[in-house]
Image (cartoon, rainbow, N blue to C red):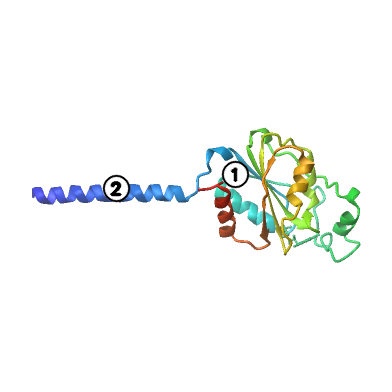
Amino acid sequence: MIMRKLFSALMAACVGLIGAMGFSACSQETGEVPEEWGDILIVYFSATGNTETIAGYIAEATGGKIFELVPVDPYTSEDLNWSDSDSRVSREHNDESLRNVELVSATPENWESYDTVFIGYPIWWGIAAWPVNNFITENDFTGKTVVPFCTSSSSGLGESGRLLANMAGEGNWLTGQRFRSSAGADTVTDWLQELGVIG
Ligand SMILES: Cc1cc2nc3c(=O)[nH]c(=O)nc-3n(C[C@H](O)[C@H](O)[C@H](O)COP(=O)(O)O)c2cc1C
């Protein structure tokens, strides 16, 4: 009888220990954001949804808040037809003065409270799609870590991040990352792990 009681107590202790080990391993894998990154905001513009998907993966992995940059005059599929030299994007591309795209809102709520800002955009003719420009120029990036990310069919990040950093004038701008248009969640979380944003 005593032996049986001892055996059950031992088994219960083992199960408890294994449970605790399992739990702690799991909580590490969910990728807690190290304190130095602080509060995270993910800002993006996306004309056809690819960059939006990546922004969603970043938000899911980091627990950051999302803010979408929405043009007052949204881009239709005709507007985006870059092979038509008279389409809206072609005209804006050819004449820089037409790239001042008014946004429904250029400043996220509680902007001052964020320490790390991811900024996402599609590549248009090798640079960041210009609807992000008014977000960059209308906000103060002092003291913030800024991480550019983009999607494209084939072009790399190129100078897109550096050009935005110059436009902002302030902030600690990291190199950033380009994703192919249909990149999956795993690719994005691998990058966030390399960056050290998630464990
Ligand atoms: C006007 C325009 C210009 C583009 N220029 C490039 C380019 O220079 N290089 C490239 O690889 N892809 C280019 N693309 C493809 C987009 O970068 C790609 O489809 C991106 O994933 C779209 O993101 P979105 O769905 O978030 O708008 C261009 C697309 C458009 C509409």
Say whether residue 135 is visible. no
Residue 75 placed where, x, y %?
A: 80, 56
Residue 1 placed where, x, y %?
A: 8, 50
Q: Is residue 166 above or below residue 177?
A: above
Q: Which corner quadrant of the image does residue 170 belong to?
A: top right
| Residue situated in front as seen by the camera: 139 or 193 | 193
Q: Residue at x 59, y 38 (%)?
A: 39
Disc 1 crowd rating (10 Å Cα; few below 14, some 14-19, many 20+) is many
Label 1 C-beta lies within 8 Å of the nearest ligand 1 atom = no
Q: Which corner quadrant of the image does residue 137 belong to?
A: top right
Question: Disc 2 on helix, strand or loop?
Answer: helix
Q: Residue at x 63, y 61 (%)?
A: 183
The answer to whether the residues at label 1 and label 2 have Cβ atoms under 8 Å apart is: no
**What amino acid type is highlighted by mark number 2?**
Leu
Q: Is residue 127 left or right of residue 110?
A: right
Residue 138 placed where, x, y %?
A: 78, 38
Disc 2 crowd rating (10 Å Cα; few below 14, some 14-19, many 20+) is few
Number of numbered discs present? 2
Q: Is residue 53 left or right of residue 193?
A: right
**What amino acid type is highlighted by mark number 1?**
Gly
For residue 64, the mark is: 1
Say whether residue 55 is visible. yes
Say whether disc 1 or disc 2 marks the residue closer to the N-terminus.
Answer: 2
For residue 17, the mark is: 2
Q: Residue furthest bottom?
A: 83
Residue 86 placed where, x, y %?
A: 91, 62
Q: Which corner quadrant of the image does residue 116 belong to?
A: top right
Question: Disc 1 on helix, strand or loop?
Answer: loop
Q: Residue at x 79, y 45 (%)?
A: 133
